[in-house]
């Protein structure tokens, strides 16, 4: 039955699709506000409006998809923006947005210090709206704005829209980043998508259709032949990172995926390569830190100076905007995973 037919059998729309605003009450998460979304497909996720409109939780029919770091959800007031202080409140979750002035390693540039992955993921959103849009096919629509701006410096604004349709095992994310200042501004962004247990396990298959793959450092080079292979959790594992140039499809989109054949469940991430022209793979098979990051971005992640030197740094003129489009698909069954690869 379609939605209009199913409406005859329900007392309230929340039986089929809903979005609720909730507030966390304990520990370092106290005060964090989330938008909790569930649709008819069995897909459930949360949008953290206290932290950059990121997505800490994603699950399907009770099976977890993302990776929740040991610190869990942490309120923005605990953010340490110096050096690697970001890690003390790095929820990871399914999606952490990095940027907008720096994405990647902490660095110093032109006399200014920048902490790991920038500030946007620890900044509360404003002008937030959420509603179920009715129609033949209802849709949860979430919108909000996050600012990365400072006096005497860059003034960047992110407008985010997340949409999730009734019965579909997918949701879309559309970002628009605008330079609201009056000088040309550097701009880096990274969508730190993190796949965790049980979708990620030693049995999982990782699909990254790359035209070219480069190791980020010498240690990663040692494991480049097995970069798409998952292994058992190892307490002594040292993280490895790779840069992939994705093969485009006929729409200039690229898709990566992780699939667990024992669960017959996976996740695919589709990106518009017109603006997200880099993909970082973060492979961490550590015990207690077991995660695979598939991270679309617009530059390399080894500091501002490196990105400027290698030509991957992006710039926005005063008043200029750039759009980013991502779609996240829950994969149910081998056939859907194989269809992703055939495309």
Image (cartoon, rainbow, N blue to C red):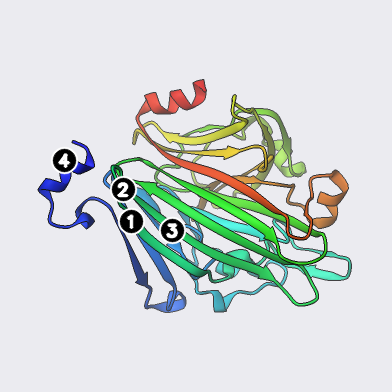
* Separation of residues labelled 4 and 3 (CA atoms): 26 Å
Q: Mark on residue 15?
A: none
Q: Dot 1, crowdedness within 10 Å: few (<14), some or many (≥20)?
A: some
Quarter of image, res 31: bottom left
**Position in image of residue 115 (x %, y %):** 72, 67
Q: In the visual, does 136 lie left or right of 78?
A: left
Q: Mark on residue 138?
A: 2
Is label 3 in contact with label 2 (beta carbons under 8 Å)? no
Is label 4 in contact with label 1 (beta carbons under 8 Å)? no
Q: Mark on residue 132?
A: 1
Is 251 above or below relative to 122?
above
**Residue 153 shows in the view:** yes
Q: Dot 2, crowdedness within 10 Å: few (<14), some or many (≥20)?
A: many
The residue that mark 4 highlights is: 5
Is label 1 in contact with label 2 (beta carbons under 8 Å)? yes
Label 4 or label 3, whichever lies nearer to me, is 4
Is 247 above or below relative to 265?
above
In primary-sequence order, the first of circles 4 and 2 is: 4
Q: Which corner quadrant holds the N terminus?
A: top left
In primary-sequence order, the first of circles 4 and 1 is: 4
* Separation of residues labelled 3 and 1 (CA atoms): 9 Å
Along the viewing direction, whichever of 319 and 337 lies nearer the viewer: 319
**Position in image of residue 83 (x %, y %):** 72, 68
Say which element carries label 2: loop
Say which element carries label 4: helix
The residue depicted at 59 percent of the width and 24 percent of the height is: 250
Say which element carries label 3: strand
Along the viewing direction, whichever of 162 and 301 lies nearer the viewer: 162
Is label 3 in contact with label 1 (beta carbons under 8 Å)? no
Q: Mark on residue 142?
A: 3
């Amino acid at each position: 039955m379609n939605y209009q037919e199913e409406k005859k059998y329900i007392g309230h729309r929340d039986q089929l699709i809903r979005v609720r605003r909730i507030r966390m009450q304990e520990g370092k998460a106290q005060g964090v506000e989330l938008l909790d979304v569930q649709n008819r497909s069995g897909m459930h996720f949360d949008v953290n409006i206290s932290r950059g409109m990121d997505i800490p939780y994603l699950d399907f029919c009770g099976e977890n998809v993302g990776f929740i770091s040991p610190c869990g959800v942490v309120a923005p007031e605990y953010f340490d923006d110096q050096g690697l202080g970001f890690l003390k409140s790095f929820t990871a979750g399914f999606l952490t947005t990095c940027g907008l002035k720096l994405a990647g390693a902490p660095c110093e540039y032109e006399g200014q210090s920048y902490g790991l992955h920038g500030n946007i993921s620890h900044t509360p959103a404003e002008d937030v709206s959420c509603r179920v849009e009715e129609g033949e096919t209802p849709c949860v629509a979430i919108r909000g704005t996050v600012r990365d701006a400072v006096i005497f410096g860059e003034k960047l604004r992110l407008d985010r829209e997340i949409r999730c349709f009734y019965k579909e095992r997918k949701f879309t994310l559309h970002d628009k980043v605008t330079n609201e200042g009056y000088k040309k501004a550097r701009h880096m962004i990274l969508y730190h998508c993190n796949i965790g247990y049980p979708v990620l396990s030693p049995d999982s298959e990782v699909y990254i259709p790359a035209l070219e793959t480069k190791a980020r450092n010498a240690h990663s080079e040692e494991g480049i032949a097995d970069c798409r292979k998952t292994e058992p959790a190892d307490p002594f594992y040292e993280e490895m990172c790779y840069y992939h140039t994705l093969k485009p499809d006929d729409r200039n989109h690229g898709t990566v995926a992780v699939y667990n054949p024992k669960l017959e469940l996976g996740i695919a991430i589709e990106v518009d390569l017109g603006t997200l022209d880099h993909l970082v793979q973060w492979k961490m098979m550590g015990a207690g830190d077991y995660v695979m990051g598939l991270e679309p971005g617009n530059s390399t992640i080894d500091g501002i100076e490196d990105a400027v030197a290698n030509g991957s740094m992006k710039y926005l003129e005063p008043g200029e905007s750039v759009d980013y489009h991502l779609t996240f698909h829950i994969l149910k069954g081998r056939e859907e995973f194989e269809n992703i690869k055939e495309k």
